[in-house]
Image (tube, rainbow, N blue to C red):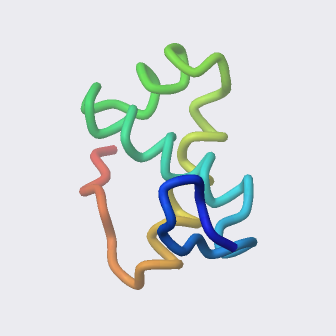
């Protein structure tokens, strides 16, 4: 598929779930907190944790150092 600007676009390479995981990661990184990210995005802390875990699995490395 070609965009209006003539560049090639990949179709179907990212799922909505992948986009959500990336968004969760970005907001959590900005806040430095899964809980604050959850509040900002209107989801639970557990949802942020699971989304980030999915992203970590996809990229094959830990993205956050968890604190108890």
65, above or below 32, in the image? below
Residue 67: x percent and y percent?
Answer: 28, 46
33, above or below 64, in the image? above
What residue is drawn where x is 71% and y is 55%? 17
Residue 42: x percent and y percent?
Answer: 64, 17
Q: 22 or 3: which is nearer to us?
A: 3
Residue 68: x percent and y percent?
Answer: 33, 44
What residue is drawn where x is 56% and y is 41%? 48
Find residue 9 and report its image quarter. bottom right
Q: 53 or 68: which is nearer to us?
A: 53
Q: 29 or 16: which is nearer to us?
A: 16
Residue 45: x percent and y percent?
Answer: 57, 32
How many numbered discs, if any?
0
Lateral position of residue 1 relative to residue 26, left or right: right
Question: Which residue appears farthest toward the bottom when viewing the image?
Answer: 60
Lateral position of residue 25 relative to residue 1, left or right: left
What residue is drawn where x is 69% and y is 73%? 1
């Amino acid at each position: 598929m070609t965009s209006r600007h003539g560049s090639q676009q990949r179709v179907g390479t990212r799922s909505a779930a992948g986009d959500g995981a990336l968004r969760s990661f970005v907001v959590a990184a900005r806040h430095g907190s899964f809980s604050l990210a959850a509040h900002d995005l209107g989801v639970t802390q557990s949802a942020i944790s699971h989304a980030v875990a999915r992203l970590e699995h996809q990229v094959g490395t830990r993205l956050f150092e968890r604190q108890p």
